[in-house]
Amino acid sequence: MHDDYFQDEGFSPVKAFLGLLTFSTILPIRVYTSIEYMTRLVWCWPFLHLFVGFLALICGYVSLNFLHFNQFLTAVIVYAFLMIITGYNHLDGVMDMADGLMVHGTPEKKISVVKDSSVGAGGIATLFLVASLTVGAVYNILDYNFIVGIMLCEMLAKTSLLTTALTSKPLIPGIGSYFILSTKPLTYVISTVIVAVIDYLLGGFAALFGVVGAVVSGLIISLLAKRNFGVANGDVLGMSNEVGRLFALLFMLIGLYVIRVI
């Protein structure tokens, strides 16, 4: 992380907003601010990643309609694009939390495994499953010609993360604690309602299923963290992000099936 995130400076909403984008992507924004100020706007995170999702949608559209790749290859390319543009930020969280869940013992022992830099078989297998299922879900979304789902699922991944942050006790110290402590009930509700409106306007009824999926995912990850660790850190939030994207896609697919049946 860039050291300037921890500089003491005056709060600027614009700088905080762009700093959050710099923090969570590899886009050449290069705007840095203190992490305390940046996380004041954590409730805006889904809207930042709506833009990231839009870039992924363009990537998928070009793959399908200009390069004439098949839907499976396009799904792989879209997932790879999302991982690369976000700097693989949350993949270590998936592996670290999974390793912690696999360990028997006290919460303290499990947390020590989560914080360990080494990766076990459970972490590797879980990352493979989450990645494979996400690619499969994107492929299925394209099969429904619901390409807008690519853009929406990236936004909803952050709604899942915020749900986990809102319902978790932070591990202090740690970068994740700033995001957890900055997620307040009121701003969370405002953020999620706006997300739901955007989903409905862009994707209709089926997209609202994705919002439910993201919230359900966030609550599940939060519950797992509480039962196993007692607290949540950045790795838990990372797991919530990746599983949230997957759940959003799966629930949107359920919505698309319901619409087709009706």
Image: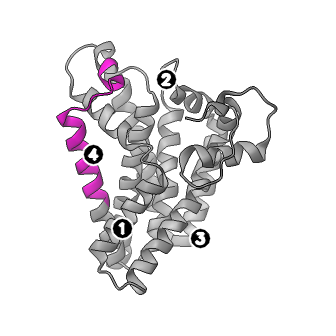
User: Is residue 63 found left or right of 181 in the rendered image?
Assistant: left
**Residue in front for this viewpoint, 77 or 97:** 77
Pointer 1 with pointer 3, Cβ within 8 A:
no
Instruction: Let me know if residue 262 appears in the view.
Output: no
Pointer 4 with pointer 3, Cβ within 8 A:
no
Measured Cα–Cα span from mark 3 to mark 2:
34 Å
Q: Which marked residue is nearer to the observer: mark 4 or mark 2?
A: 4
Q: Residue at x 20, y 36 (%)?
A: 122
Q: Residue at x 63, y 34 (%)?
A: 184
Q: Which marked residue is nearer to the observer: mark 1 or mark 2?
A: 1
Q: Which marked residue is nearer to the observer: mark 1 or mark 3?
A: 1
How far across and down, in percent of the image, does residue 211 sit?
A: 48, 55
Q: Which residue is mark 2?
A: 169
Q: Which circle's residue, 3 or 2, is located before the other in the chain?
A: 2
Q: Which circle's residue, 4 or 2, is located before the other in the chain?
A: 4
SS assignment for the magenta stretch, majority: helix
Measured Cα–Cα span from mark 4 to mark 3:
32 Å
Q: Which residue is mark 1?
A: 77
Q: Is residue 140 magenta?
A: no
Measured Cα–Cα span from mark 4 to mark 1:
17 Å
Identify the amino acid type marked 4.
Leu
Q: Which residue is mark 4?
A: 127
Answer above or below: position of 225 versus 173. Answer: below
Helix, strand or loop at label 1? It is helix
Answer above or below: position of 114 versus 184. Answer: above
Answer above or below: position of 83 versus 10. Answer: below
Q: Which residue is mark 3?
A: 201
Q: Which circle's residue, 1 or 2, is located before the other in the chain?
A: 1
Q: State the extent of the magenta-drawn residues as a range.
A: 112-134
How far across and down, in percent of the image, does residue 134 sit?
A: 32, 58
Helix, strand or loop at label 2? It is loop
